[in-house]
Amino acid sequence: MAGWKKGFGRRLRFYLIGLGLGTLIAWGMLWRGRDDLPGFWPQQQIKDEITRAYFAGDSLSLCFFDCLGTAPKAWIDALPESEVLFSKSEPRRSPYRRYYIQHSGPQDSSASVVELRDSTWALVHIETGRACFCE
């Protein structure tokens, strides 16, 4: 009986070493430092969904873009460098999902709350260092 336990522990140890080495090699060869991989992480999926959706173009969103001093296209182009903060987001909100997106620019940083609808998106709130009065 003691030989069985010793042999099982040895086989388990070799299995775990092989699994660890295989994972390390796969990470080193396939995933390390690659930005061109498909977005399978939640943050990248949200950014892709916003990019594929149409801008709603409502008056509140346009006012927010005027306050930011940018256009919706430029905002979308800066989206890959932004970060989605899940602690402040409401992904299970009904009927629309809201995501808090932190932008870090060369001059200042801002935050936006994006509301994703069926196939459109709109800005519903922004936080900047400038005074902005949109209603």
Image (spheres, helix red, strand yellow):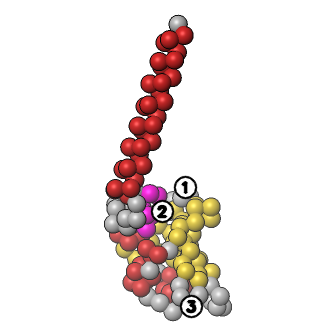
Q: Give the labeled residue for mark 3.
A: 107
How many numbered marks are there?
A: 3
Q: Which residues are magenta?
A: 41-48
65 relative to 43, above or below = below
**Residue drawn 59% across the image and 87% down it:** 108
- Tell me the SS state at disc 1: loop
Give the distance between the C-alpha atoms of the residues marked 1 and 3, in whole angstroms. 33 Å
Type of the residue with mark 2: Gln
Q: Is residue 46 magenta?
A: yes
Q: Position of residue 29 (x, y in %)?
A: 34, 56
Sequence-wise first label, 3 or 2: 2
Label annotation for residue 92: 1
Q: Nearer the viewer, residue 19 or 82?
A: 19
Question: What residue did someone put label 2 on?
Answer: 43
Q: Disc 1 residue type?
A: Arg
Q: Could you say which is closer to the camera, residue 37 or residue 128?
A: 37
Relative image position of residue 121 (x, y in whole percent): 44, 72
Q: How far across and how far down the image is residue 32, in percent? A: 40, 60
The secondary element bearing badge 2 is classed as helix
